[in-house]
Amino acid sequence: MSTATHHKGQPDTAAPAIELRGISKAFGPVQANKDISIRVMPGTIHGIIGENGAGKSTLMSILYGFYKADAGEIFILGQKTAIPDSQAAIAAGIGMVFQHFKLVENFTVLENVILGAEDGRLLRPSLAKARKSLRNLATEYGLDVDPDAVIQDIGVGMQQRVEILKALYRQADILILDEPTGVLTPAEADQLFRILDRLRAEGKTIILITHKLREIMEITDTVSVMRRGEMTATVKTADTSPEALAELMVGRKVLLQVEKQPARPGATMLEVENLHVTDEKGVERLKGISLEIKAGEILGIAGVAGNGQSELLEVLGGMIPGTGTIRVNGQDLDLTGKHSDGRSRRARGIAHVPEDRQREGLIMPYTAWENSVFGYHNDPAYQKNMLLMNNAGILKDADDMMNRFDVRPPNPRLSAKNFSGGNQQKIVVAREIERNPDLLLVGQPTRGVDIGAIEFIHKQIIALRDQGKAILLVSVELDEILSLSDRIAVMFDGQIMGERLPGQTNPQELGLLMAGVAGKAA
């Protein structure tokens, strides 16, 4: 169905698919969008980039009817269109795939696709119609997904396909994707790009919100740059470069490559020998892992998500039990007893930036200053007496920390949920690094983070290494692993497949190890 069928009158097919004129939106004193105008042409992929907190997601949420603009107008194919809610957006042919998927985890793919779009009280006809439609969409766009699979049993790449299928099932001609590769492996991201290319070839219009310049250069036709709530530039992708876009985003030149001196490893800080982890379902997730990290070096763990990296971080961080031997500074850690928890790990000089900041790193309704001390709230510096905490001291430290780590807005009284994803990540990274740990466990440090914040976080990690600290880095971003690591270990199916030096390997060799098709010799 073309977008034209969603509107009264005859649309102007030569007009932009989407045009926003003078859009402004404020949340209290924070001006999220300021007099923004943008034109997106039909049958193109239009990128929108900017730092975290630049207002990208707010602008698209206005287009999708989640927020109501304080001022401005929306035109779809030349016709002024009111979008008071998401139902109106869907009726106007707009679909949105959010950074954090809106799926019911214990429902099947088919049930999620029809949810909210049922044809009547009886579900059977709706399910039959959706099953046929999904077959057609899979053939047309390469979106193969098992319709009877339960969401919680499929990977994030497949879950994202379900979100796209939901939008297409509702006959969307305009797709908005918010940070679509934030949770995808490089291979899954490449597959997504092939799908988007196919959608574009079929005449769909796609708005891609991302902070990843490689993706912008690879897949978009046009790119608009936002900074601090304003639209600063719109350029043809072919006429620009990653360096130019980074400078437009941040307002200064940005280092796209990590600058660091060679590591100066000291004594062995972490030793892991024959480590095993079995999950609650009896599945062995770690199968005899052995590794070591010296003070003053970064060991990067590469691998496709779901191959044991998460469990490695969790057992080291005291979140789950395991068997085997873990030593820090030459002393064994408790893996199953009363001293195997996160609090005991922190007492041993271990800090942990978890992979999922919202589920494991922050309590979202709590303020930034409260989140800045979680896990360290028993520090004597924060205790007034046996009953009360020194909240004024915590608040001041949080304020100082937010300024040092450039958290925006620098308001410690704001709830964590009101910060952008990248600024949430900065709060977690700051909390852990500021504790001056001997060993830092860091999972996906820059997932969903903009280019300026990536540069900042990378500098903090390198600075910690140069202070003689040991760092275990887990990331699905191969560029990040290659740039930051002093040594790289590759995991597949709960085992170490091999170890490489960054200067003596490449993404292709690491990809073979990640797929489990290469030998285990280091």
Image: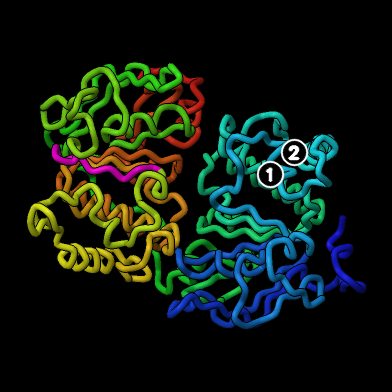
Q: Which mark is residue 142?
A: 2
**Quadrant of the rendered image containing residue 157:** top right
Residue at the (26%, 57%) spot, across then down: 372
Q: Indicate the position of residue 208 as horizontal and vertical percent values.
A: 62, 58
Q: Which mark is residue 194?
A: 1
Residue at the (38%, 41%) spot, across then down: 481
| Residue 255 makes an appearance in the image | no
**Quadrant of the rendered image containing residue 416:** bottom left
Residue at the (74%, 65%) spot, across then down: 88
Residue at the (54%, 53%) spot, across then down: 214
Is 348 inside the magenta-drawn segment?
A: yes
Q: Indicate the position of residue 307 as horizontal and vertical percent values.
A: 45, 27
Looking at the rendering, the stretch of residues picked out in magenta corresponds to: 346-355
The three-letter code of the residue at mark 2 reads Gly
Element at label 2: loop
Report whether 81 appears left or right of 161. Answer: right
Answer above or below: position of 404 versus 171.
below
Quadrant of the snapshot with the C terminus: top left
- Mark 2 or mark 1, earlier in chain: 2
What scheme was used to colour the molecule? Answer: rainbow
The three-letter code of the residue at mark 1 reads Arg
Report whether 361 appears left or right of 16. Answer: left
**Quadrant of the rendered image containing residue 60:** bottom right
Quadrant of the snapshot with the N terminus: bottom right
Q: Are marks 2 and 1 in contact (CB under 8 Å)?
A: yes
Q: Residues within 10 Å of mark 2 (few under 14, many from 20)?
A: some
Q: Which mark is residue 78?
A: none
